[in-house]
Amino acid sequence: MHAAGLDALWFTTEAEVRYFTGFRTLFWQSPTRPWFLVVPRQSRPIAVVPEIGAALMAQTWVEDIRTWSSPHPSDDGVSQLASVLRSFPKVGMLMGAESSLRMSFHDFQALRAQLPGIEFLDASPLVKAQRMIKSEAEIAKTRAICTIASNAFAEAPSLFHEGQTLSDAFRASKIALLRLGVEDVPYLVGGAGQGGYADVISPPGEQRLQPGDVFMLDTGATLQGYFCDFDRNFAIGHASDTAKAAHSTLYRATEAALAIARPGIRASDLHRAMAKVIGQVDSDVGRMGHGLGIQLTEPPSLATFDNTVLRAGMIITLEPSVTVTPGHMLVHEENIVIRDGPPELLSRRTLAELPVI
Amino acid sequence: MHAAGLDALWFTTEAEVRYFTGFRTLFWQSPTRPWFLVVPRQSRPIAVVPEIGAALMAQTWVEDIRTWSSPHPSDDGVSQLASVLRSFPKVGMLMGAESSLRMSFHDFQALRAQLPGIEFLDASPLVKAQRMIKSEAEIAKTRAICTIASNAFAEAPSLFHEGQTLSDAFRASKIALLRLGVEDVPYLVGGAGQGGYADVISPPGEQRLQPGDVFMLDTGATLQGYFCDFDRNFAIGHASDTAKAAHSTLYRATEAALAIARPGIRASDLHRAMAKVIGQVDSDVGRMGHGLGIQLTEPPSLATFDNTVLRAGMIITLEPSVTVTPGHMLVHEENIVIRDGPPELLSRRTLAELPVI
C-alpha cells in the first residue's frame, strides 16, 4: 500500500472480505444487504456491516466493527462507510478485470458525494498479486477438497450408467461428494454426447447417457470455502477411436504443461505448451486454465495474453480443450500448485486412456 | 419503458439476464467473464456474451447474439456492447437498492467514454415492479421446490440426532434434498443452542446437537433456478418451556400475517401484524420476510419502511424472529403466494407446537 500510494483498501465483494478477514457466510446469496471492509495501511481493519452480521464478524480477527440496521430505505451503510473512509485521502478499490462493485450505483454516487476530497484509485494489481500466492494453510484446504473430489470421481462406475439422465447423474455426483465430506458443490457442470459434448457451461437436462457417449463432469466443490475445480471424462459402454485420441491428446497436453510448470515461467508459456500438443487454439474457450482458491476462477489466466510470472504457492488449473468434430469437444482439467521444483498435483492424475464405464 | 422514457434496458447481472432470456448457467460463478443483455423498447433483445456462452444462449428465445473471445486483455466486450447501446439515447440500468454492476469499474468508465451522447438512467423501479409479480409458470416451479423441501424436512427425525455435528446435520439435509429431487442447495444456514441460536447466517461447525437444543435449518434449494426459502425448528430430545413459547409466538405471528395477506395491503402491514404478536421489533433482523423467486431474496421487504402494495402473484416469505434471551433467538419462515382471496401456502405449514426429535 505504501509503494502504491494508498492509505487504505476498501472492499465490497465476498471473496475479498473473506480473504482479508476470514468472514464466511452464505448470506452473500441475498442481494439485499451491502457489506464493507476497510483495510488501512497503518492500522487494523474496520468492518462496516449490517447488524445481522456483527456477531459472526466478531469471531474473526477484526475488532473494529461498525454496524447499521440493514436494509435501510435511505442510508444503507453509506454514511457509516463515509465516516470511516474520510480519514484516508487515497482509497484503493478494485477497478480492474474480474472485479465488480457490490453496492448500488446510487449508493456509490452518494458515497463519493459525501467524500469530495477523497481519491479512489485502482488496487486491483496489488490485491491480485497478494491473492495469487497461497499460504500452506490455503494449499492444505485445497488439497483436502481435491482429494475428496478425486475419491468421488473414483466411484464413477457405481454412480453413472447408460440410460441415466444427465440431471440424475449430476445429482448422484453431488450426493457422493457430500457423503465423502465436501461442504458444498457450488459449481457442477458437464455434458455428454457421441464423441464429445457441445459446451461446458450448460445445466443438466433430461438427456440420457448413451453407449458411445463421452460424459464429462467438471466439479467445483468446496471445503471451508476453498474450491477444487477439475473434470473427468468417461466413455459410456465403449469409446470411439476419435474420443480415445482426443483424450490422449488432452492427457499429453497436460503432461507438457506439468513438465515446464516451474517458478519463473509465464502463464502464457503453459498455454503455448498445451496448444502446441493440441495443434489448435480453441477460440471457444480462449484460455486453458486459471488460478484457483476461494473463487472458482482467479487470476492468472493461462492464455496467450497473460504474461504473469509463475511463483511458488500459486494454485492453478490446467484445462486444455480440443474440438473433436464441429460442435463436439473434449475438455480435461487438473489442479496443481507451483512449487520450487516440479509442481504438486492436487487432483489425482487422470488415466492416460479414456476410462470406459 | 415508453412511460419511463427509456429506449432500452441494459443488464449485467445473472438474475436479470436469466429473467429476461431464460439463460441459465453456473458459469456466473466465475468472475472472469462479463455477460450483457440489451432489451430495446421496440425490438427484440440483444445478447452480448462471451463466445463460450453463444450455443447455450441460442437455445433461449434470443436470436440476436453478439460474441467476443473472452477473457480479452484490452477489450472484454466493451466495444461490442457500445456498438449496440449507441442506438439508444436513453439506456435504463439498475442503480437502486439491491442492485450491483457486474463489470469492472474500468470497463464501465470505458463504455461511457465510448458513448458520450448516451444517457444512463435508473431502471430499478421498472424492473422491480415487473419481477415482483410471478407468472403461474414461475409459481408452479416455486411450489415444486417448496414441496420437495417440505418432504425433506418431514424426514428430520431420521436425518438429525443428538450428538451429530452441525456440519454433518447440514450435509445430511443437503443429501436428503438432492435425493428427493432438488437441483441444488445454494443456501443452507442454521444454528443450534439451548433455548435458541446466536445468529442465522453462520456456516455449520463441529458443535454437536445437545438435548434441549433448538436446531434450526433455513433452506434455499432450487429447481430450474427457482428458490424456496423457509426454515424449520426442531427441539433435540426435549423442549424447554421458553423454546415452546417462542415457537408458539412465531407460529401465531405468521398466522396473523396469513390472515391479512391480500392484494391491496402493504408489505409494512404484514410486518406490523407480526411485530404486534411478537411484542418486539427485532433490530438484528430488521425485516420479517421478503420476495422470493430466481433470487433467494427479492423485493419487497416486509419492513416498516416498505410500503409496496401487495398484488396477486407475488411470492413472499413470512419470517418473524424473536429474541428468547440475549444472544439466543428463534426464527420461523414460510413461503406464500398472494392470491385474490387467502394466500396460497407453498411451504407445508409448520406445526403449531415445536416438534421434538
Image: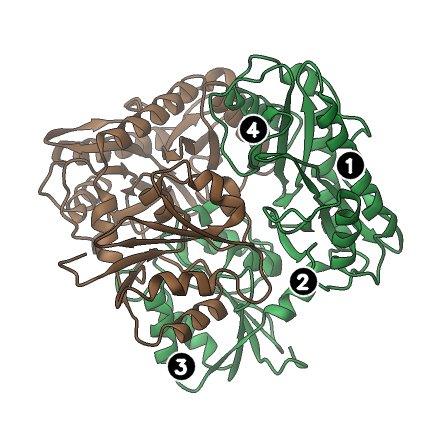
Chain colours: A green, B brown
Instruction: State the quadrant of the N terminus of chain B.
Output: bottom left
Q: What residue is shown with label 3?
A: A115
Q: What residue is shown with label 2?
A: A305
- Helix, strand or loop at label 3? It is loop
Label 3 environment density (alpha carbons within 10 Å; few <14, some 14–19, many ≥20): some
Q: Is residue A36 above or below residue A326?
A: below
- Helix, strand or loop at label 4? It is helix
Along the line of sight, which residue is nearer the eye, A302 or B166? A302
- Residue occupying the point 32% across, 30% down: B142
Name the mark nearer the viewer: 2 or 3: 2
Disc number placed over residue A249 in the picture, else none: 1
Q: Amino acid at mark 1?
A: Thr
Q: What residue is shown with label 4?
A: B171
Alpha-carbon span between mark 1 and mark 2: 23 Å
Which chain does the numbered disc 2 sit on?
Answer: A
Alpha-carbon span between mark 2 and mark 3: 37 Å
Label 2 environment density (alpha carbons within 10 Å; few <14, some 14–19, many ≥20): some
Name the mark nearer the viewer: 4 or 1: 1
Residue A243 seen in this snapshot: yes
**Image marks 2 and 3: residues in contact by CB distance under 8 Å:** no
Asked if both marks, 4 and 1, belong to the same chain, the answer given is: no
Is A132 on the left or on the right of B308, as rendered? right
Instruction: State the quadrant of the C terminus of chain B.
Output: top left
Is B18 on the left or on the right of A262, as rendered? left
Asked if both marks, 1 and 3, belong to the same chain, the answer given is: yes
Residue B163 seen in this snapshot: no
Is A279 on the left or on the right of A191, as rendered? right
